Image: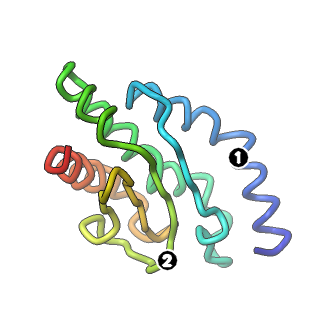
Amino acid sequence: MGLKENRFTKTFQEEQFPELKAQIIAAAGFDVALNIEWETLFENRFLHLYNDSYPKIYFIPLIEAFKAITTDEMGKEALAESLKEIRITNTKDHHNPKNAYSFVDGVLTVDHSPIINADQVENRIEVLTDLLESNL
């Protein structure tokens, strides 16, 4: 990462991330570990779009899927017992949520392009909710 990316990441981490993390914790019902590989979440030509696309791609789907899962005690317990960590990365530039999410040994991995199909939030929420419901 260069200076531009480092500056953007620092600003995002200070200004937007704390509220998004708080919403994830509130939706999950516990303080789940977040492992974000910030250095992989960049394509230089799109830096100006990340303030909008990061929440839509990486965080809002988690928040909304956790809300859907934890609507009752059974869901809250299942999520708390099964989910150990959320790993966010971009190693394969996936843009189809069916390929971008995995849940193995308590680790929910989000491996998604930081920009492609950013506005397809509902699709990501649906796929993620289905994945979790099937694996909890």
Q: Amino acid at mark 2?
A: Thr
**Quadrant for the C terminus in the image:** top left
Residue placed at 31% from the left, 62% from the top?
102
Vertical placement of 25 versus 55: above or below?
above
Vertical placement of 45 versus 11: above or below?
below
Q: Which residue is mark 2?
A: 91
Outermost residue to the right: 3
Instruction: Report x, y in % for residue 118.
Output: 43, 61
Element type at mark 2: loop
Please tell me in which quadrant of the rendered image residue 45 appears.
bottom right
Vertical placement of 76 versus 5: above or below?
above
Residue placed at 23% from the left, 47% from the top?
132
Instruction: Report x, y in % for residue 38.
Output: 64, 62
Q: Is residue 136 left or right of residue 113?
A: left
Q: Is residue 44 or residue 135 the one in the foreground?
A: 135
Q: Is residue 127 or residue 118 the one in the foreground?
A: 127
Element type at mark 1: helix
**Quadrant for the N terminus in the image:** bottom right
Q: Is residue 92 or residue 103 the one in the foreground?
A: 103
Q: Residues within 10 Å of mark 1 (few under 14, many from 20)?
A: some
Q: Which residue is mark 1?
A: 13
Q: Is residue 134 left or right of residue 60?
A: left
Vertical placement of 87 versus 71: above or below?
below
Residue placed at 42% from the left, 43% from the top?
60
Instruction: Report x, y in % for residue 95.
Output: 37, 72
Please tell me in which quadrant of the rendered image residue 30 appears.
top left
Q: Are marks 2 and 1 in contact (CB under 8 Å)?
A: no
Outermost residue to the top: 73
Q: Amino acid at mark 1?
A: Gln
Outermost residue to the left: 134
Instruction: Report x, y in % for residue 87.
Output: 48, 57
